[in-house]
Image (spheres, grey):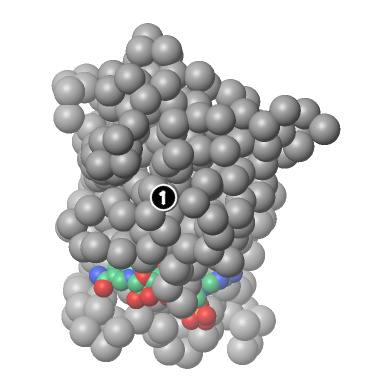
Amino acid sequence: MSEVEKVKCLIIGSGPAGYTAAIYAARADMSPVLYQGMQPGGQLTTTNEVENFPGYPEGVTGPDMMVQLEAQAKRFETDIRFGFIDKVDFSGDVHKCWAEDGKEIHADTVIISTGASAKYLGLESEQLYLKNGGGVSACAVCDGFFYRGQETVIVGAGDSACEEAHYLSKLCTKVTMLVRRDEFRASKIMADRVKNTENIEILFNTETDEVLGDGQVVTGVRAKNNKTGELIEIPCTGFFVAIGHKPNTDIFKDYINLDETGYIEYEEPGTSKTNVPGVFVAGDAADKTYRQAVTAAGTGCMAALDAERYLAAKGH
Ligand code: NDP
């Protein structure tokens, strides 16, 4: 068996939350080790242009921004590792974590920044235009701006879909909302807001059959009424998927308090503390409300500062 590695600060995940935590922890001499996870760079690597992160007046692509954040974390000698942590044991004083290659790590502090994954329908055409940045997105606040003055389609019927449809309605000439049942899941107030917005058309009992396009960009959506079987084509340049997110928190569930949808609960509001002393959380793994790169980065900073104070209080 390989030797146990002891670290002061282990950061799990590599989106803006993880890299920001690494920059702060490294500059505080905590010699952080960061495991990048299944999708190095996180959700932003599936975003094309990021125009709302302060400090980039001309915008930056998601992947470029992650390369820069990684370089900044490396500049202060963060030990960045390709790979993921697939098991933890937070039952004792030492926080035990195992990488997928079997390596055992004992960490004084752990910062969880494993993020969340947007759910997608899984259609081949959806994935094609998602991957090539041709008009499929799971974040209206991130990408809605690119569809100003154009027509968009959004799928979903929860609070997120309603919030995002309303957001898009202020930018787009028309938003068509595809709801698979004959009612919303969203709270009444959110659903009413959508229903009362003139340029949002709601199609109930309607599912996405195919995302249409020319191979490069989206040109429309073929939708199917699941009661009548009728197929219709809706012209649009943007297709937004808002069918929920899944926080990447499964490996922590036996030790860390999660809410009913799997998001990590803060032990003390206004901090990054979880219920386990020495384990902190940053970014979307604990955030179902804002989900922005800049808020993730902000909480990454908080987690590193909280970890540093925790170590200082322990006399490290
Ligand atoms: P939800 O899980 O609440 O809703 C997901 C929606 O997507 C449901 O309407 C579901 O349909 C639909 N859906 C799922 N799979 C498919 C599919 N394959 N095809 C078509 N539709 C599909 O997720 P949200 O992200 O909306 O919300 C998550 C949590 O965050 C909730 O607790 C919500 O209240 C909260 N939230 C609160 C906000 C606020 O208060 N401002 C804003 C955003 C979120 P169906 O209903 O048929 O299952």
Callout 1 secondary element: strand
**Amino acid type, mark 1:** Val
User: Where residue 59 sits in the image (x, y, percent)?
Assistant: 26, 24
Q: Position of residue 29 (x, y in %)?
A: 33, 20
Image side of residue 178 versus residue 277, left or right: right
Q: Residues within 10 Å of mark 1 (few under 14, many from 20)?
A: many
According to the picture, the residue beneath numbered tag 1 turns out to be: 279
- Relative to 256, is 114 above or below? above
Residue 53 in view in this figure = yes
Residue 190 in the image: x percent, y percent? 25, 79
Residue 250 picture quarter: bottom right
- Given residues 275 and 72, the one toward you in this image is 275
Q: Nearer the viewer, residue 154 or 229?
A: 154
Quadrant location, the C terminus: top left
Quadrant of the rendered structure where residue 23 is? top left
Q: Nearer the viewer, residue 191 or 196?
A: 191
Q: Residue at x 51, y 38 (%)?
A: 107
Seen at 67% across and 37% down, the residue is: 104
Which residue is drawn at the image coordinates 42% and 21% (left, top)? 31
How many numbered discs sit on the rendered protein?
Answer: 1
Q: Residue at x 42, y 54 (%)?
A: 285
Quadrant containing ligand 1 reads bottom left
Residue farthest to the right? 1
